[in-house]
Image: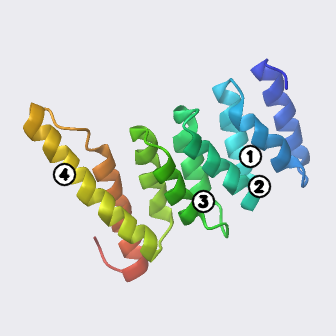
Amino acid sequence: KDEDYYVVIQALAILDAVGGPELPGRAIPLLRHPHAKVRALAIRILGKVGGVKGAQALAAAVSSGEHPEEARLAAQTLSLIMNVEADKLLLAAYRANDNYDTRVAVAVALSRCPTAEVEAFLVSITRQSFKEWLKGLFGRFTGAPKDLREAALHSLEEIRKELHGKKG
């Protein structure tokens, strides 16, 4: 509960070294700590520990939009946790958050979740983001950011390699 991030980081590092079943319960509330370094360490610990409880907390952190600067790390970490249906949690997080950078981070993280549902979702993102990009291009000749489309295309290529054994 200490606001001094250095003290919290040291305490969390000790808890991480000791481990134990209570570690996720101690790390989860720190996803909302005022300091970014504490939030990042909590994300890393939850990824290391794994489990449904930690995965759900990471998905909630991505969905909330409270700290978009850690959303990328949380989405990547979530995508690496096994046996927690990370694909469904990431899809729900994407739909719950309209922050562009967070959506890009989720699209990248989805490349590690090869399911037919993710494939269909990424196809829809590439189509929708292309239309948005064209609308911006014709409207101002500057174009809308195309990072989301590029991330979705890359993830789609990775998903198709895994699912179908072929490129894009």
Sequence-first disc among 4 and 2: 2
Q: Is mark 3 on a helix, strand or loop?
A: helix
Most foreground residue, 163 or 145: 145
Mark 4 crowd level (few <14, some 14–19, many ≥20, 10 Å Cα): few
Q: Are marks 4 and 2 in contact (CB under 8 Å)?
A: no
Q: In which quarter of the image is residue 82?
A: bottom right
Question: Horizontally, is 41 left or right of 119 in the view?
Answer: right
- How far, Cα to Cα, is label 1 from label 4? 39 Å
122 over 101 or under it: above or below: below
Q: In which quarter of the image is the N terminus?
A: top right
User: Disc 3 or 4, which lies upstream in sequence?
Assistant: 3
Q: Earlier in the sequence, mark 3 or mark 1?
A: 1
Which mark, residue 68? none
Q: Earlier in the sequence, mark 1 or mark 4?
A: 1
**Residue 48, percent across and down?**
73, 53
Specify the label residue 45 is tagged with: 1
- Number of the front mark, 1 or 4: 4
Residue denoted by label 3 = 80
Of badges 4 and 2, nearer the viewer stands 4
Helix, strand or loop at label 2? It is helix
Residue 117, image quadrant: bottom left
CA gap between label 3 and label 4 equals 31 Å
> Depth check: 117 or 157 in front?
117
Mark 1: secondary structure:
helix
State which mark lies toward you, 3 or 4.
4
x and y percentages locating residue 155 in the rendered image = 38, 61
| Disc on res. 49 | 2
In the rendered structure, which amino acid carries the disc numbered 3? Leu
Residue located beneath label 4 in the image: 131
Quadrant of the frame with the C terminus: bottom left
Q: Do the residues labelled 3 and 2 touch (CB within 8 Å)?
A: no
Residue found 78% across the figure and 21% down from its top: 6
